[in-house]
Amino acid sequence: MSIILQDFVKNTNGGFTLGGKPFRFVGANVYELANLESGITKKIIEESAEAGFTVLRFWLFENKPVQEQIKKLNEICDAVNPHGIKLIISLADKWGYLQNYKIDEAWYKGGYRSEYLKYVTAITGEFKHRPEIMIWELINEPETDDFNVFYDFAREVSEEIKKVNENHLLSVGTVGGVGDKFGSYLSVFNKENFRKLYSLKSLDAVSLHDYSYDSGVFERLDILYRFKGELKKAERYSKLGSSVEKPFAGLDGYFLKKGKLLRFPLTLRWLWNIYNNRDVSFARNIGKPVYIGEIGFKNIQGRNRVKIMDLDIASKFKNGIDGIMLWSFEAQGWNKDGHDYGFRLGEGFEEVVKKWNI
């Protein structure tokens, strides 16, 4: 396979640029991409290109020997190269999925130095000359009881990566909005720690995640208890959430017919949007681009999810977001989502993606 020479994505005056031109994108999460056999990986990339995606995000956690991961990532870079697709790669995960270890307070206090630090510097250093890679994320959706400990972790790791690789952008896979627990549970409403984190010179772009359009308090509890293994509690909150959501569905449909998105005051959707806009304003002030690494829209029967997606993307680009990564592209039957956020080819979203990626 012949490799096409490409430019690196850069942060230029607080925005993503590619080849000296602004680079705005709608991409997709294909989180299992690096954990599948070669034939499936190639087909997922081909489907992604067919759908019009220009960026893919996936997980490259430490669950195999480094040389195997290097071989797999070279394979992925070679496969996306002819399509001009860029990559966002998350290097660890708070939830511990597809990873050899759990992340806790002791890990942030120094446990990461035993394996993780060696792994990420080896991987990022090996691929410093591959322009297919756009962003390395230190960890997906981190949270901690002690922000100062997490800050020291992020500073050390990002600075060590910059020593071996200055070509790629660095970020942390933070949730933003009101989703980052950096201290007590009330810390999600305090943006001081979030701003201190991204003021690090070794971090180049600000990451947000956004499931607020369909996500309420009960669904957050459902997810929490599922990860704790308390399935009966999770199911209880899931059913309660579904019953609470029904009255809002009719209102959503009414406004959608008029080409508008409803953000009802005091809902999570309304509140998250306010905090997202604050995060964007902060990112602009420190000269860093901001992207939504995960955004989800539920597949609810009878609802025009494609139109919602189109209107929400338009709103977020208007408000200063530089890139949006949809969750989750279930290409070839992989990357499945357990909360009805997944989507596949043929559902109509391709027109929206191509429209915004022109």
Image (tube, rainbow, N blue to C red):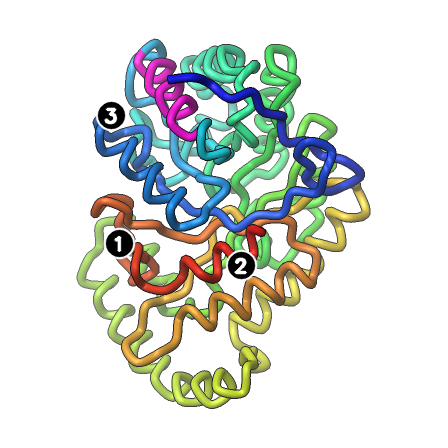
Residue 358 in picture, x, y percent from top left: 58, 51
Residue occupied by mark 3? 38
Residue 265 in picture, x, y percent from top left: 59, 81
The residue lying toward the viewer, choosing from 203 and 8, is: 8
Report the disc number at residue 331: none
Pointer 1 or 2: first along the chain:
1
| Residue type of the residue flagged with mark 2 | Lys
234 magenta-colored: no
Residue occupied by mark 1? 226
Report the disc number at residue 355: 2
C-alpha separation, residue under disc 1 versus residue under disc 3: 31 Å
Residue 203 in picture, x, y percent from top left: 66, 31
| Residue type of the residue flagged with mark 1 | Arg
Pointer 1 or 3: first along the chain:
3
The kind of secondary structure element at disc 1 is helix
The residue lying toward the viewer, choosing from 334 and 117, is: 334
Asked if residue 180 can be seen in this view, the reply is no
- Magenta-highlighted residues: 68-80
| Residue type of the residue flagged with mark 3 | Ser
The kind of secondary structure element at disc 3 is helix
Pointer 2 or 3: first along the chain:
3
